[in-house]
Amino acid sequence: MTTTRKSVLSLALCGLLVGSAWAHGPSRQKVELSIDIAAPADKVWARIANFHDMSWHPAVARTDGAAANEVGAERVLVLKGEGEPSIGEQLTRYSAERMSYSYKISKGDVAVLPVSNYVSHLTVTADGDKGSKVEWRGAFYRGFPNNDPPPELNDAAAIAAVTGVYQAGLDALKRELEGR
């Protein structure tokens, strides 16, 4: 094989590899937010510990589901808004001792929250005797699984939506528990 022919084949192979890299689809996104609350950790945990009570979040009209915090438990968050949009979620991990639980979306609509394969974790930690920190973090893919997503289902839209949900919830929790 001549040197020129080898070079052409090498360039063609590189082009295929580069083209494949561009066609991989969406990448996993992450959002991590936390807030300091001037209230003891056990008081904060008591407010969010029940997986089936998300009344502390301003976007939630009601939560439907059984009262147990058992792994595998399902809840439906009925959101405020026209037509009562909803999101189904499943508890995947729960530890009262660690003041933490994890869950995933089991039934979602990208028109309600523009994400797919969403998992989330809520954790409360003590910050001295009279303070606490609440961390809410999640990982997900954008709502459109293929290349060239529409603007309302792209990575930026997914990140903005999840960030908005987390920030609104953490801010409301802080206001409620600090009596403001």
Image: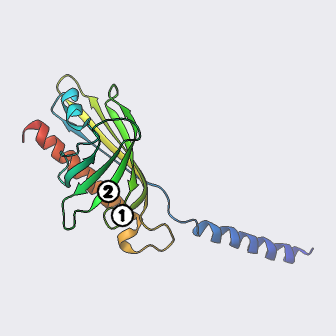
In-front residue for pair 158/12: 158
Under mark 1, the amino acid is Asp
Q: Secondary structure at mark 1?
A: loop
Q: Does 154 sit above or below residue 118?
A: below
Q: Which residue is mark 1?
A: 109
Q: Position of residue 102 (x, y in %)?
A: 38, 41
Quadrant location of the C terminus in the rendered image? top left
Asked if labels 1 and 2 touch by Cβ distance under 8 angstroms, the answer is: yes
Residue at image location 36% in from the left, 50% down from the top: 89
Q: Position of residue 32 (x, y in %)?
A: 35, 47
Q: Quadrant of residue 103?
A: top left
Label 2 environment density (alpha carbons within 10 Å; few <14, some 14–19, many ≥20)? some
Quadrant location of the N terminus in the rendered image? bottom right
In-front residue for pair 23/75: 75
Q: Among all residues in the image, which is located at the extreme left? A: 180
Q: Quadrant of residue 131?
A: top left
In-front residue for pair 162/15: 162
Q: Among all residues in the image, which is located at the extreme right? A: 1
Q: Could you tell which of marks 2 and 1 lies nearer the N-terminus? A: 2
Label 1 environment density (alpha carbons within 10 Å; few <14, some 14–19, many ≥20)? some
Under mark 2, the amino acid is Ile
Residue at image location 39% in from the left, 52% down from the top: 105
Q: Secondary structure at mark 2?
A: strand
The reply, left or right, for residue 1 in relation to residue 141 is: right
Circle on res. 62: none
Give the alpha-carbon distance from disc 2 to disc 1, as whole Å.
Answer: 7 Å
Q: Which residue is mark 2?
A: 87
